[in-house]
Structure formats: structure tokens, C-alpha cells
Amino acid sequence: MSLTISFAVLFAALLHASWNAMIKGGGDVLLDTAAIVAGAGLVALPFIFFVPIPAIESWPYIGASVTIHIAYYYLMINAYRSGDLSLVYPLMRGVAPLITGVLGIVTLREMPGALNWLGMLLISVGVVALALRSVHHSPSGRAVGFALMNALVIAIYTIIDGTGARLAGDAWAYIVWLFVLDAIPFTAYMLVRHRAAFIDVLDRRRTRGLVGGALSAGAYAISVWAMTKA
């Protein structure tokens, strides 16, 4: 992996942690998540006019990713409702790389080299170690359960999107269409089940939603792009 890609991935991690902190620090985890997901879709929408349509081979992967992201949002919302950011976030993001490595072997027959495994292990151990203090001082089996289940979901959609972006012919096209379509199910659910509260939070906190959406879209766009270059 080149130095440029390494710095890009680190920057993506910073963006990702930032929008997660916005969700946990907001007034309502469900509403804030929905606003950021909608914001990401709106931020991505204009770019569909500047990227090609992804190759037909990649569309099943886009559909699968949109579907699995429903589980991702559900688990993330419940994890943050049940535990602190300092506990939930490191578990979700720290365990996922190891699961991704294993799934890559099983599904793609991709065997990481020894140095790659060592790197993933060190990163995962370092990130998960950040959660150990929170587990000790503020134990929450429910939060840990949701976080670990979401680590599995993260690994699954990482494999899906890494493969889909390669098949798309243009990684940025895949990313743009993914974010536009990803916003539809969650937004539709909120309009059906929580219309008044959702419209209110979009009106009162539109800037927060758009900024969070830009951070979310930017973080994952960089990550998917990096996967196609690795």
C-alpha cells in the first residue's frame, strides 16, 4: 500500500469517527442518524451527473450493500442507545478488520500476507484496547452485543463494496450511486413511522445533517477507493 493510500485511509478514519461522534452527541440517535444518512444522499446526488453509470455487473453488489446497511444502521443506533461512544465505536471498528480478513479468505480466496495480517492484528488490538476501560467502568452487555454484531455487518459490506467497486469500472461511480440509493430506505422508513419528528429535525438541524452526511460519504468513499487500489 502506497503512502498516499495510507494517509487517505487515516483521513477517512478521522472523518468516520467525527460523524459517529455527531450521532452519539446529538439529542436523539435515531433522528440524528436518519438526518446524516439523508444528508449523505443529498451530498452525493449532484455527482451522479459527473460519473458514469456503474457496470451492470456491479448493481447486485449495490443492491446487497444498500440492504445490509439497513442492518448496520439498526445495530449502530441500538449500540449507541445502550453504551458510550468510547465503548461501542472501538469495538465496531476494531473487530471488523479481522473479520473482513477471514471473510476475504472464505469468499474471495484472497489470502493476506503475513505483514498484512500483522498490521490488521495490531490495528484491531490497539483500537479494541480503547474500549477495555469503558467495559470496566461502564459495563453494558447489550451495547457490546450490538457492537460486535455490527462489526460482522461492517465486514460483510466491506467485502461486498470492495468487490462491487472493482466490477463497476469506476469506483467513484459505484460510491456515488451507493450513497444516493442507500438514503432511500431509511428516509422512507422515517417518513412513514416518524414523519413529524424527522421533518422537524431536518428543518432545525439541516446543516448538521449535511455536514455529517458529507463526513460519512467522504469517509466511506475514500475507504472504498482505497480498497480498489490495494
Image: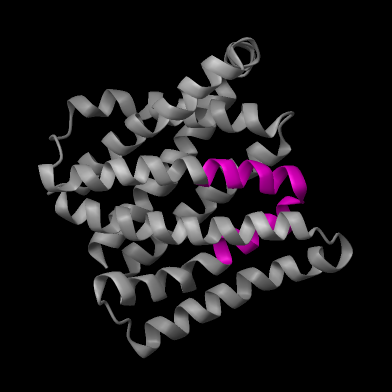
Task: Name the residue rendered at 43%, 28% in the picture.
Answer: 185
Can residue 76 be seen? yes
Q: Is residue 84 magenta?
A: yes
How many numbered discs?
A: 0
Q: How is the image coloured?
A: one colour
Quadrant of image for the N terminus: bottom left
Q: Position of residue 40 (x, y in %)?
A: 43, 31
Q: Write down the quadrant of residue 134 in the picture.
A: bottom right
Task: Name the residue rendered at 80%, 66% in the picture.
Answer: 135
Q: Write down the quadrant of residue 174 in the picture.
A: top left
Q: Position of residue 105 (x, y in %)?
A: 32, 77
Task: Name the residue rendered at 40%, 26% in the picture.
Answer: 184
In the shown orientation, is residue 223 left or right of residue 30? Answer: left
Residue sticking out furthest to the bottom: 114
Q: Nearer the viewer, residue 128 or 164?
A: 164
Task: Name the residue rendered at 40%, 59% in the picture.
Answer: 156
Q: Position of residue 9 (x, y in %)?
A: 41, 60
Magenta stretch: dominant SS?
helix
Residue sticking out furthest to the right: 137
In this picture, which residue range is highlighted in magenta? 72-94
Residue 52 vs 76, above or below: the answer is: above
Q: Is residue 59 magenta?
A: no
Quadrant of image for the C terminus: bottom left
Residue 134 vs 45, above or below: the answer is: below
In the shown orientation, is residue 84 left or right of residue 211? Answer: right
Q: Nearer the viewer, residue 146 or 2?
A: 146
